[in-house]
């Protein structure tokens, strides 16, 4: 995987070198704009001299007088996708190198200077640490990063072709869409069938995301039902005028509590609702 990521980074760098320049103003365009503007001023001056009309020559423009350059939206999208893809491919290569070092260190458990029992204990210790630190998930991240980088590169290349030629862009867009559709189907199929052999780190990530989404939806649905049931009970109690039990003395109990049996104290004397409402 590090070799593949390195090769892909080299290919992507060639595109980045040729596309990042569209984010900067071209010196040739600036020169042409200055020459055109100054020529127009000179032509106006000569016309005024020939016709005998008054003409106040304006100051010739310089580079500082030109409007500020703003790259186009496609140029920003292309470079954003290409640079993100390049960063992800380099990250995949670097992470792949680290994983190879971890695996090499893990495989060095069989030492000729130790007894077989000690070697087995070291291997078991490293295996438990491998599982406890979830190294397998990090190893699976390397190809996933490379896959995302390739997809972003394809999208950026399609946008680049749309700025150059429509016919070529249409052909490449069709093939790219078909390819991405096939990849998407291969990634989603394991979610619907556990017996599907198209399992990959990306597919496992999609399955985990689907499970998390289902759990969140179930939680919010149950919470909404409980909230609605609580308010329904409160509203029903309010409509029916169901008496509530009073737990303390009040000089003027609420009308809903007049039929309820309650007790309280006032000045050391035990009072009840029956004695108050007689």
Image (cartoon, helix red, strand yellow):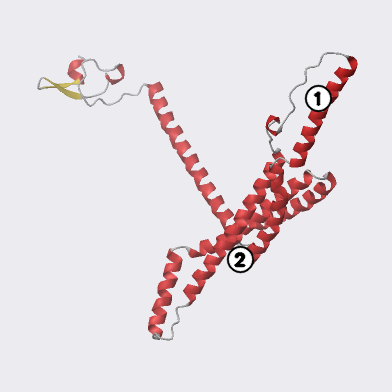
Residue 1 visible in the displayed image: no
232 vs 9, left or right, is: left
Mark 2 to mark 1: distance in Å? 59 Å
x%, y% of residue 236?
Answer: 41, 26
Residue in the foreground of this view, choosing between 256 and 267: 267
First in sequence: mark 2 or mark 1? Answer: 2
Residue in the foreground of this view, choosing between 134 and 37: 37
x%, y% of residue 67?
Answer: 70, 30
Label 1 crowd bin: few (<14), some (14–19), many (20+), radius 10 Å = some
Residue 23 visible in the displayed image: yes
Q: Hey, which quadrant is residue 266 in on the image?
A: top left
Quadrant of the rendering where the C terminus is positioned: top left
Quadrant of the rendering where the N terminus is positioned: bottom right
Residue at the image point whose x is 47% and y is 36% from the top: 224
x%, y% of residue 63?
Answer: 70, 34
Residue in the foreground of this view, choosing between 8 and 245: 8
x%, y% of residue 235?
Answer: 42, 25
- 86 up-or-down from 55: above or below: below
Residue 41 — which label? 1
- 192 up-or-down from 80: above or below: below
266 vs 164, left or right, is: left
217 vs 153, left or right, is: left
Q: Hey, which quadrant is residue 62 in on the image?
A: top right
Residue in the foreground of this view, choosing between 221 and 229: 221
173 vs 147, left or right, is: right
Return the residue found at the far left.
268
Residue at the image point whose x is 45% and y is 66% from the top: 131
Callout 2: SS: helix
Residue 174 — which label? none
Label 2 crowd bin: few (<14), some (14–19), many (20+), radius 10 Å = many
Residue 2 — which label? 2
Residue at the image point whose x is 40% and y is 77% from the top: 122
């Amino acid at each position: 995987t590090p070799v593949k990521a390195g090769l892909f980074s080299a290919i992507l760098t060639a595109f980045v070198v040729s596309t990042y320049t569209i984010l900067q103003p071209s010196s040739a365009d600036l020169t042409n704009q200055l020459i055109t503007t100054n020529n127009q001023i000179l032509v106006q001056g000569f016309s005024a001299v020939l016709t005998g009309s008054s003409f106040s020559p304006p100051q010739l423009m310089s580079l500082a007088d030109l409007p500020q350059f703003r790259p186009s939206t496609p140029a920003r999208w292309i470079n954003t996708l290409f640079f993100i893809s390049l960063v992800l491919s380099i990250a995949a290569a670097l992470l792949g190198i680290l994983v190879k070092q971890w695996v090499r260190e893990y495989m060095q458990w069989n030492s000729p200077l130790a007894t077989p029992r000690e070697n087995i204990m070291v291997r078991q210790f490293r295996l438990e640490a491998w599982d406890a630190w979830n190294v397998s998930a990090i190893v699976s991240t390397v190809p996933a990063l490379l896959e995302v980088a390739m997809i972003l590169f394809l999208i950026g290349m399609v946008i680049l072709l749309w700025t150059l030629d429509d016919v070529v862009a249409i052909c490449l867009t069709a093939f790219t869409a078909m390819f991405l559709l096939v990849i998407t189907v291969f990634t989603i199929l394991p979610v619907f069938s556990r017996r599907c052999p198209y399992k990959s780190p990306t597919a496992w990530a999609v399955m985990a995301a689907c499970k998390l989404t289902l759990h969140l939806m179930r939680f919010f649905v149950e919470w909404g039902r409980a909230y609605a049931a609580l308010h329904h009970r409160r509203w029903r109690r309010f409509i029916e005028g169901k008496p509530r039990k009073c737990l303390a003395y009040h000089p003027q109990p609420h009308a809903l509590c007049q039929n309820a049996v309650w007790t309280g104290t006032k000045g050391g004397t035990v009072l009840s609702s029956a004695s108050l409402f007689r």
